[in-house]
Image: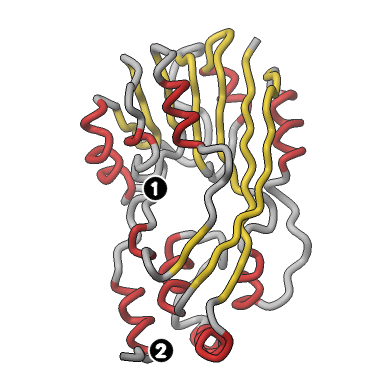
Amino acid sequence: MVRTFSELVAEAEAAPVEGWGFDWLRGRATEERPPWGYARLVGDRMAAVRAALDVDTGGGEVLAEVPAPPPLLVATEAWPPNVPVARRNLRPLGATVVRVSDRPPLPFRDAAFDLVVSRHPVHTWWGEVARVLRPGGTYLSQQIGPGTVRELSEAILGPLPPPEYRHPEVAVADARAAGLTVVDLREATLRTVFHDVGAVVWFLRKVVWTVPGFTVGRYTDELRRLDERIRAEGPFVAYARRFLIEAHRG
């Protein structure tokens, strides 16, 4: 049965967006995975340390995959709806989830952790990362690159200027300015496919920086045009940008 625009949008508006899992999109949208396997890299490093911190854990979905957690494992999260989700997901690992503000400082003493990780942080406070790392410690992060899913943003907002932030070279410079040594930097462009407008609506509700201030009511006309385009031409394709950065404290 072919579903109407209104039915697809209503379903997507009613669906929960807490946490940082994307299971709701299964069968409705796909995104290629970066080739470096971030979750595996995190698991490998967690097994070799005694104290680790996950910054901006979301709902703890990635951290929950760690097969051998260290004796001390802490995660932070700033968005209140995610905090209980993270606590539930990370309880089996014995992790402590700390609700924080979205600004520094981190509520931890200097040189508290052997390892700090972060997947898709909203902002990387490099000075704080360096402060809480022990000498010889590692920061490992998968970050969102410049202009990620720009094609979708422009389908809703119209033409946009070149992206001014989230450039990997800026991250490298900021890490070095904080006293860290960058030992690895990798980039990837990942094909992202939306099969219906409901998937688009749910994604925009969850990944809020794609279209800042998004609501269905505000962008109904644009969503209708996108729905018509998908029905006439097939799935909407955009491209996500990611980069992996690893830095050590000397």
Spatial separation of the CA atoms under disc 1 and disc 2: 30 Å
Q: Are marks 1 and 2 in contact (CB under 8 Å)?
A: no
Between 47 and 54, the residue placed more toward the observer is 47
Residue ID at (40%, 34%):
76
The secondary structure type at the circle numbered 2 is helix
Q: Position of residue 52 (x, y in %)?
A: 42, 20
Q: Amino acid at mark 1?
A: Trp
Between 11 and 40, the residue placed more toward the observer is 40
Report the disc number at residue 26: none
Neighbours of disc 2 within 10 Å: few (<14), some (14-19), many (20+)? some
Q: Amino acid at mark 2?
A: Phe
Q: Which residue is mark 2?
A: 5
Between 116 and 23, the residue placed more toward the observer is 23
Q: Earlier in the sequence, mark 1 or mark 2?
A: 2
Q: Position of residue 176 (x, y in %)?
A: 73, 24
Q: Name the image colouring.
A: secondary structure
The secondary structure type at the circle numbered 1 is loop
Residue ID at (72%, 40%):
168
Q: Position of residue 7 (x, y in %)?
A: 33, 86
Residue ID at (43%, 14%):
48
- The vertical placement of 177 against 97, above or below, is above
Q: Which residue is mark 1?
A: 79
